[in-house]
Amino acid sequence: MREVNVLILSAGRRVELVQSFQKAAKRLNIKSNVVAGDCSKTAPAIYFADKKAILPRISEPNYINEIINVCKREDVKLVIPTIDTDLLLLSEEKERIESESGAVVLISNTEVVSICRDKINTQRFLEENGFKIPRMYSEVELDSEELKFPLFIKPKSGSSSINTFKVNNLEELRTYRSLIREPIVQDYMEGKEFTVDVFLGFNGNLISIVPRLRMATRSGEISKGKIIKDNEIIKDIKRLVQVLKPIGHITVQLMKTNKGIEYIEINPRFGGGAPMSIQSGADSCENLYRLLMGEKLEYNENYRDSIMFLRFDNSICVDENLEIVQW
């Protein structure tokens, strides 16, 4: 039996993602150790993984070297990034990691990541390629007394909806602009918000598109969602990936408004709600194992429609030695 080991970086609270890889390996009857890597010894996901790796912080100079060392030690075949701050560094170091470790890094090229990580680059890319996105205001325009509210403000390189606010008046705008580092200001959108899980092969061939209605969120992450096989969204996302050319699992946020489909952001990684799409039948984890074993996959929409997911918290108990206490 071939062994296909996976390293999940910044595993943190990604217990569902760890378990999704474990379940996929079991279904395919392949041997796979899911290794959870994190800088914290108390990251919940490391207690559910088959193996754990305590890594330096992303900002430390030996971070990439330690990833390579873990890949060699654990015979890792696939490296999965999960947080935004990792992405640009991993895309820049992708070739080195792969050549020195033999593992595939599931990250798009630096050009794609640069477009997605910088909200101004994202805005420019979408506008230049004919996709709808709320108007972004210049510094000169923001100093005008003739602005129409509400507006929306967010950091240029933010994530998890941190420091994102609806702006109702000029006083609020001035306050938020003074508090947020490198803010961008756009028209405020109203409509139905969707997260779309998109999966592409290592060569960029499109395999699945799963729109999820965001029914409720907490701290920027979906807490209640519904799979909706929306053909209008699917058609627009197909056009988007043809132009952008990402690889792997990416997460697109958009809204259906009275103007049509308007984009919010593109994250070239697994989103926190990805296990919803995986459980619906668009199993990116199983797809990755199949690709690593040399299978060719075609585009399909073989996932269940109109099902809801209601996420909740759970906990584990550890003793003074950080060993799980069984109750």
Image (cartoon, rainbow, N blue to C red):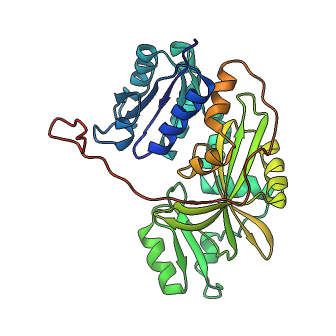
Q: Is residue 164 above or below residue 253?
A: below
Residue 144 appears in the picture as rendered? yes
Q: Quadrant of the N terminus?
A: top right
In the picture as drawn, the residue positioned furthest to the front comes out as 327
**Which residue is found at the position 82% from the left and 55% from the top?**
236
Q: Residue at coordinates 60% horizontally, 31% vertically from top-left?
A: 106
Note whether 90 is above or below 250 in the view shown: above
Instruction: Return the x and y of residue 59 as percentages of the image width and height.
Output: 38, 38
- Residue 203: % across, % down: 75, 28
Residue 217 on image: x %, y %: 52, 66
Q: Nearer the viewer, residue 10 or 29?
A: 29
Tell me where residue 317 appears, x and y as whole percent.
25, 46
Residue 228 position by quadrant: bottom right
| Quadrant of the image occupied by residue 192 | bottom right
* 23 left or right, relative to 261: left
Q: Is residue 250 left or right of residue 325?
A: right
Q: Is residue 180 above or below residue 119?
A: below
Q: Nearer the viewer, residue 193 or 140?
A: 193
Tell me the quadrant of the picture where the C terminus can be found.
top left
Q: Is residue 57 visible?
A: no
